[in-house]
Amino acid sequence: MKEKLIDNAIQVLERNFQEGGFTIPSEGLYPFQWKWDSGFIALGFAHYDLKKAMGEIETLMDAQWENGFIPHIVFHNDSDSYFPGPDFHQSHLHPQASKKYRSTGMTQPPVTGFILERLLEISGESHEMLDFIAKHIDKVYHNHEYFYTHRDLEKNGLVYIYHNWESGTDNSPIWDDIWDTMDPPEYEFERRDTTHVDPAQRPSKREYDHYLYIIDIAKKYNYDDAKIAEHSPFLVLDPLFNAMLIRSNEALIKLYGRLGGNEDKISFLGEKQAQSIAGLNSKLFNEDLGAYVHFDLRNNKQLLYVCSSSFTPLYAGAPTQEQAKILVNTLMDKFGDEGRYLCASFDPTHERFNPRKYWRGPVWINLNWMLHHGLKRYGFTDLAQRVKNDSLELIDNNGFFEYFDSRKDNPDAEKNGYGGDNFSWSAALLIDFLKDES
Ligand code: GLC
């Protein structure tokens, strides 16, 4: 079974690999290069084709802006199967945007640092990979510098996101509270996603109005960070985003140590790292909920919901052992019922939970991958194994879908895999999960 699954996963990756040397997340639905997808995809390639793994990172870094920013989508190619495309985003409005590629003017969770660390491990510490890292690590560092310079408003080590698409968890019920504070115009546009996927599994038209409106505000200010911070109705400290930054800082410190020299960079990262961990634990940990939560900077309050992002600080090593225990209790209490696969993307005990709709409940493989490694890091070995087994079983039973129903006895569907089919990171991370055992 294992070999067959790996073969099938390789086929998915090969099919999604493009001539330009990058990989699309899913044909039709996502026809360009996405930032955090690229990181996870590179891990899958690394197990059988190091060149492709390196190419994946290289093609992303090539689109970095002069100020260190890395966009969430790079429009390497043309495609009319996606909205909103490059003409809507207009990244050229920012004076330091890439002159070579069109892109969006927003970013996604900073995974590249820890991806480089894992690539080195997978390569068996090869010289080739070490050379590759030496060539690219400063770009990732520059990206972290960008975050701490332009996105850390309160100078407490926590960086904000200004759009729900920056979080990676596009239509999480958490954002509903923010949509309630807004009244965007009704946009006229042709949705493309719902021609590929059942609309019941995607965000609503009204939600899209909010998404587009925030982009229009950012465009009005030419994607200037300070202006966005002043005017965007969406300004959030996200535990997932910050956990990724912290985990990637840790990786960069380790990799710089391995390469030698660069004391100034190691010390900058070390200082920021300490601040970010302290910030995360003081501002985003909620004792009553027993979990990390999001903080709405615009309206100055914590958003009191538990979702799969709430547990990602485990992967970053941010909680104390005591906090880790509290997190695991919350996880088991709300998400851990034996009748469910781990880990639903949103609190299954909450009225906003929807088991079929995108980030409002289904299981996502990349979140499970981070949760698995986070639980292992804190010694919760059995639970880590359960998260991994659940991920493998969902893919084995249903295929390489984008997201999955968490209910083991889902009464109203013939299958439990939703969204895009032949989805790249589900394939890539399955390979990494399975090869990790051997
Ligand atoms: C969806 C997901 C996002 C991902 C993108 C491409 O928008 O919410 O996290 O990066 O698809 O796969």
Image (cartoon, rainbow, N blue to C red):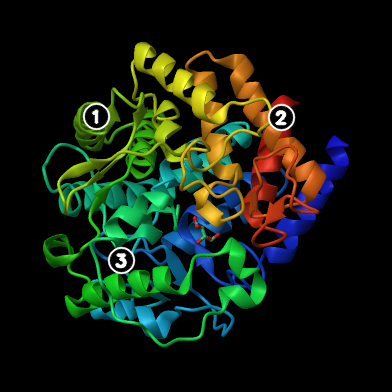
Q: Tell whether 133 sits left or right of 429.
A: left
Say what secondary structure mark 3 lies in: loop
The location of residue 295, given as percent across then percent down, is 24, 43
Three-letter residue code for mark 3: Trp
Q: Tell whether 47 sits left or right of 162.
A: right
Tell me the distance, in whole angstroms, between the alpha carbons under discs 3 and 2: 40 Å
Three-letter residue code for mark 2: Asn
Q: Which mark is residue 65?
A: 3
Q: Is residue 21 visible?
A: no
Q: Which mark is residue 389?
A: 2
The location of residue 357, given as percent across then percent down, is 57, 56
The location of residue 100, given as percent across then percent down, is 39, 77
Q: Which mark is residue 113?
A: none
Tell me the distance, in whole angstroms, between the alpha carbons under discs 1 and 2: 35 Å
Residue identifier under label 1:
270
Q: Tell whether 51 sits left or right of 376.
A: right
* Mark 2 crowd level (few <14, some 14–19, many ≥20, 10 Å Cα): some
* Mark 1 crowd level (few <14, some 14–19, many ≥20, 10 Å Cα): some
The answer to the question of whether label 3 and label 2 lie on touching residues, with beta carbons closer than 8 A, is no
Tell me the residue at 22%/74% (across/down): 217
Please tell me which residue lies in front, 387 or 67: 387
Please tell me which residue lies in front, 29 or 271: 29
Relative to 29, say whether 275 is above or below.
above
Q: Name which quarter of the figure residue 323 lies in.
A: top left
Tell me the distance, in whole angstroms, between the alpha carbons under discs 1 and 3: 24 Å
